[in-house]
Image: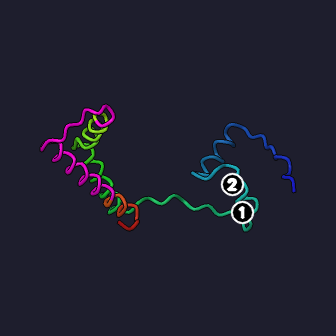
């Protein structure tokens, strides 16, 4: 079954502006359909904002990322592994353990913030 040809509607700039304001975040065509076909129009869910607790967890992860050198340390370790110049000493072992713990904490915290199981 083929789709019908598109329908075109000419509006003044003021009319278009008014329609866009009334539509809010809904796509303009969907808003027009919802007004014209009220009961039959598709229903769109609004994007939900994460609850405050989730926002706090996400902020904590971002703060931890910003204040740690985990990403930089992992990048340097990967670089040396690729070059074959990695020498494992106490400092590197400690960095690896810290990085693994940070990544594990971030994973669990992000999963909790996003409503998943950790």
Q: Alpha-carbon distance for marks 1 and 2?
A: 8 Å
Characterize the local packing of mark 2: few (<14), some (14-19) or many (20 or more) Cα atoms within 10 angstroms.
Answer: some
Indicate yes or no whether the magenta region holds residue 78.
no
Is 54 placed left or right of 91 in the picture?
A: right
Q: Secondary structure at mark 1?
A: loop
Q: Identify the disc placed on residue 1.
A: none
Q: Position of residue 102 (x, y in %)?
A: 25, 52
Q: Give x and y (percent) for residue 38.
A: 72, 64
Q: Is residue 88 left or right of residue 47?
A: left
Question: Residue at the spot x=20%, y=51% of the render?
Answer: 97
Was residue 94 drawn as part of the magenta stretch in this picture? yes
Instruction: Tell me which residue sits at (63%, 46%) in the image.
Output: 20
Badge 1: how crowded within 10 Å, few (<14), some, or many (20+)? some
What is the x, y in percent for residue 7? 82, 47
The residue closer to the viewer here, 98 or 25, is 98
**Frontmost residue, 32 versus 91:** 91
Q: Earlier in the sequence, mark 1 or mark 2?
A: 2
Which numbered dot is residue 41?
1
- Residue 78 falls in which quadrant of the image? top left
Image quarter of the C terminus: bottom left
Residues in magenta?
81-107
Q: Main secondary structure of the magenta part?
A: helix
Per the image, the residue denoted by label 2 is 30
What is the x, y in percent for residue 88?
A: 18, 41
Q: What is the quadrant of residue 70 in the picture?
A: top left
């Amino acid at each position: 079954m083929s789709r019908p040809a598109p329908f075109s509607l000419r509006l003044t700039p003021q009319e278009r502006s008014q329609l866009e304001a009334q539509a809010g975040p809904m796509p303009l065509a969907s808003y027009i359909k919802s007004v014209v076909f009220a009961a039959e129009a598709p229903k769109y869910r609004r994007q939900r904002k994460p609850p405050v607790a989730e926002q706090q967890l996400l902020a904590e992860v971002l703060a931890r990322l910003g204040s740690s050198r985990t990403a930089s340390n992992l990048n340097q370790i990967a670089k040396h592994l690729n070059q074959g110049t990695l020498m494992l000493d106490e400092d590197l072992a400690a960095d690896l353990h810290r990085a693994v713990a940070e990544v594990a904490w971030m994973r669990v915290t992000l999963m909790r913030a996003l409503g998943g199981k950790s």
